[in-house]
Each structure stands twice: as C-alpha cells, then as structure tokens.
Image (tube, rainbow, N blue to C red):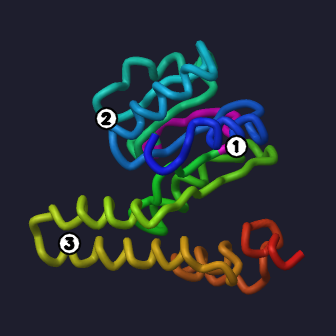
Amino acid sequence: MKGLCPNHLDHIITSYHRHTTIVFCNTIAATENVEKELKKLYRGEVMVYHSRNKKQEQDMLSGKKHIIAATSALSMGVDIRNVDLVIHYNMPMSLADYYQMAGRAGREGQHARSILLYTPDDYTENHWLLKCIEEKGARNRALRRLDEMKEFCEDEEQCMVITLLNALGDSHENACRYCTNCQKGR
C-alpha cells in the first residue's frame, strides 16, 4: 500500500468504523491493493468497487460487505446506506471530487467522519495522470483544480469547511470547529 502502512489504515478503521467504510482511491490498481491488504485484517467484510468490477454491487447494497475500496465510480449514483467513515486514500483530483466523496458519509444523519490522507506523491501521480488529457483547455482546467486541491491539503491554518465551501461558490463564514485545522486551535 503506497504511502501508508496497513497498520495505519487499520488504526483509522478500528477507531472510527461502525457501520460502513468507504476507502476512495484514484486508480483501479490502488483499490485492488487496498482491498488485498484490508482482506487480511477484515476477512469477509471487504470488497472492491470500480468501473471494471461491479459484480459485488449487490453485496454492498445489501449490507453484506462493510468496508469498500473504491474509485470515484462509486460516487456516481450508487446509494450506500449507513456510511459513517470515508477515507480518501489518495488525494482527490479536485475540491469538487473531494466534496462529492466526503458527502457519502452521514447521509442518514448519523455521526460520520471523512479522513483525507495526503502525501506529496499523490500530487505527482495525479499531475502525471492529468497531463495525459489530450485537449489542452480541459487539461489546463484539470491541472488548475489539482493545484487548488494541493493547496487545500497543505493548508494547516484555515478551516477546511470554510475553504472548501468558499472554493465551490457557497459562502460560509464561521469555522466548523471539527476539521483538523479547527481542532488544532482547541
């Protein structure tokens, strides 16, 4: 598991997982690596979901599997109940992607967490992937969004909720008191 040892991911899941956990990864290879490592720790509870592997969708929707390693394909119209933990294993490509994935947690009003794991390698890998976009205008827009996401990940002072909502065009003035940066000030 690139950038994070299985024990660290296990610690996060053990600390916060109650019902359903989604671990979002940027590539199919990463989802399959995360699934492989987590299956060693959580036998019978882990599945992978990406554009090439949707055959286990019924197990996920019926609640038979409680830990899902997935690409952003999962955010597109699949309604999973009781998600109380979202882990972003890789830095998302944009703030909008992050917001959409994080929003999977707590939809039924339950207490939920979204944890963003970030290493500078994530930016480098994402940048390489986005440079492959052929159309210059689309590529430049995607790279700008990636740079915004990197700034968000590296900002250790501003309330993450204010930064995120303001960047997405929804003004929010009061600090949330719950994000990592707000917790530092408590």
Which image quarter is the C terminus in? bottom right
Q: Is residue 29 left or right of residue 175?
A: left
* Residue to which mark 3 is pinned: 138
Q: Are marks 1 and 2 in contact (CB under 8 Å)?
A: no
Mark 3 or mark 2, earlier in chain: 2
* Residue to which mark 2 is pinned: 51
SS category of the residue bearing label 1: helix
Q: Position of residue 107 (x, y in %)?
A: 68, 46
Q: Is residue 78 magenta?
A: yes
What amino acid type should be assigned to the residue bearing mark 3?
Ala
* Above or below 73: residue 186: below
* Above or below 135: residue 45: above
Is 131 in front, or is 120?
120
> Please, what is the dominant secondary structure of the magenta stretch?
loop
SS category of the residue bearing label 2: loop
Residue at 66% x, 35% y: name it.
Answer: 10
Foreground mark, 1 or 2, reads: 1
* Residue to which mark 1 is pinned: 12
Q: Is residue 88 magenta?
A: no
What amino acid type should be assigned to the residue bearing mark 1?
Ile
SS category of the residue bearing label 3: helix
